[in-house]
Amino acid sequence: MSRSRDEVVCSKSIPERMSGNEAVSYAVRQVNPDVMPAFPITPSTEIPQMVSSYIANGEIDTEFIPVESEHSAMSAAIGAEAAGARTMTATSSAGLALMWEELLLAASNRLPIVLTLVNRTLSGPININCDHSDGMGARDTGWIQIYSENNQEAYDNYIQAFPIAEDPRVHLPVMICQDGFITSHAVENIELLEDAPVKAFVGEYNPEEFLLNPGKPVSVGPYAVSAYSMEAKRAQEAAMERAGEVILEVAERFREMSGRSYGFFEEYRTEDAEYLMVIMGSAAGTAKAAVDMLREEGHKVGILKLRVFRPFPEKEIAEAIRRSGCKAVAIMDRCESYNGCSGPLGSEIPAALFRNKVMVETVNYIYGLAGRDFTVEHVQDVFAELEEVAQGNKEAPNHKYIGLRE
Amino acid sequence: MRTDITRINENSPYTDLTEGLQLYAGGTSRLFKTGEWRTNTPVLDDKCRQCLLCAPVCPDSSIPVKNGKRLDFDYDHCKGCGICAKACPFGAITMKEGIEA
């Protein structure tokens, strides 16, 4: 029976203790996707492992395809989704890098695949710990990207991914990101939702056009001559532009079901902040703790935690920074861009500010690469430096590494 | 609503294209005249004994067979690869330079 996505069933909260990987796997059980091709890679391995257990125990009837590589995992996901099946996969780091070609195909063929990415650094040097170089490397592949601060957000974002991806205004794949080990393996408190409201929220997947549809043939991924390619790319970009409003609508329905609110970003104690920090992922939790301590000492500091990175909420970020009236912004990148001047957020946020005529001092910091600790003290140091820069006592450092031995 | 892909052409604005340029129809490759790419053209003469060794080796299915007999080439889709000429045991197919038969 197909359910209308407009009906929202309120859910009771079920208090539990889980790791981020457990939480996402629990959500997979509730969604019961049709197909999951996956290849194990640290630190996301537990997700296919736990989903396989749910399947083996007869709790869900997802078709699990054990493939020989991530290149095959995404290829199989594309085939399954094009055939008409709700499809997901999970990966990390080199696994996502190996999917790169197919990531672009999934997006350009407008297939609403959901990928849960457990962020891990890319080689080299080879290392298994968290940074955002895998997700950031895929930032121009046409996927919607949503980053999670903790296990709760990884769970909540995963459930919202399907209605966003499958909305006819969007039809784009969605990547739900959580920080490797820090979120994926640390066990924290979580409020789970009941099965029935989650199933009603996600609804049945009923694509209009799909390959295994007798009597209604369709060709997917045809060659396009130059006279069509540019138009196809622009149409894909238009879908990404429309995704913003859909993400907010889905978040509103999610709030009605769960009581938890989400937007493009979270503004934490920014209302009268003189100094802001823009940050993404688990480090936002550390930054909030530091902000609480600094606020008690009388420092007017706040956090803008970016949740939706693609589509990039350019106007909204610029407007939030304008509204705060802050004097300086620290832009935190858990990824090196190797462009000689800034990390990815360090490029995009100043561009957003400039285009929207918000002229405020920005300093770009690189932190936490390959699992390097990022502490409350680091956040305090960043705010202290911002204050000195804004007061003209110090020149703004360009593209500064935190916790680096120099 | 299925999009009638024959109504999409090189003047269509991007908003009128199908999602991911999907084609909501079957057998659409017939509409695309790949024979225009040809630089050599196979020509059949009366040495043909209708042995039909040429038809199955054609990579573009451009040798139609009807009632046990091959017909003339489908020049709309023949790319002029010359495999049929190599396969013919009777020398009934010659490759002529140019796109015209």
Image (cartoon, grey):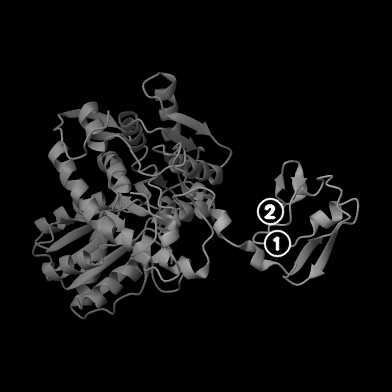
Residue pictured at 19% horizontal, 49% vertical: A249
Residue A338 visible in the picture: no
Q: Earlier in the sequence, mark 2 or mark 1?
A: 2
Q: Which residue is tagged 2?
A: B60
Residue pictured at 81% horizontal, 68% vertical: B96
Q: Indicate left or right for B16 with A384 as reference.
A: right
Q: Indicate left or right for B98 with A254 as reference.
A: right
Residue A360 is situated, as x and y percent measured from the top left of the image, at 21, 76
Which chain is mark 1 on?
A: B
Q: Is residue A344 above or below residue B2?
A: below
Residue A213 visible in the picture: yes
Q: Which mark is residue B79?
A: 1
Q: Residues within 10 Å of mark 1 (few under 14, many from 20)?
A: many
Q: Residues within 10 Å of mark 2 (few under 14, many from 20)?
A: some
Residue placed furthest toward the right = B90
Residue A162 is situated, as x and y percent measured from the top left of the image, at 31, 42
Residue A237 is situated, as x and y percent measured from the top left of the image, at 35, 63
Q: Indicate left or right for A184 with A202 as reference.
A: right
Say which quadrant the C terminus of chain B sits in.
bottom right
Q: Is residue B61 above or below residue A57?
A: below
Q: Is residue A80 above or below residue A140?
A: above
Which chain is mark 2 on?
A: B
**Circle 1 SS class:** loop
Give the residue type at disc 1.
Lys
| Residue A125, picture quadrant | bottom right
Give the residue type at disc 2.
Asp
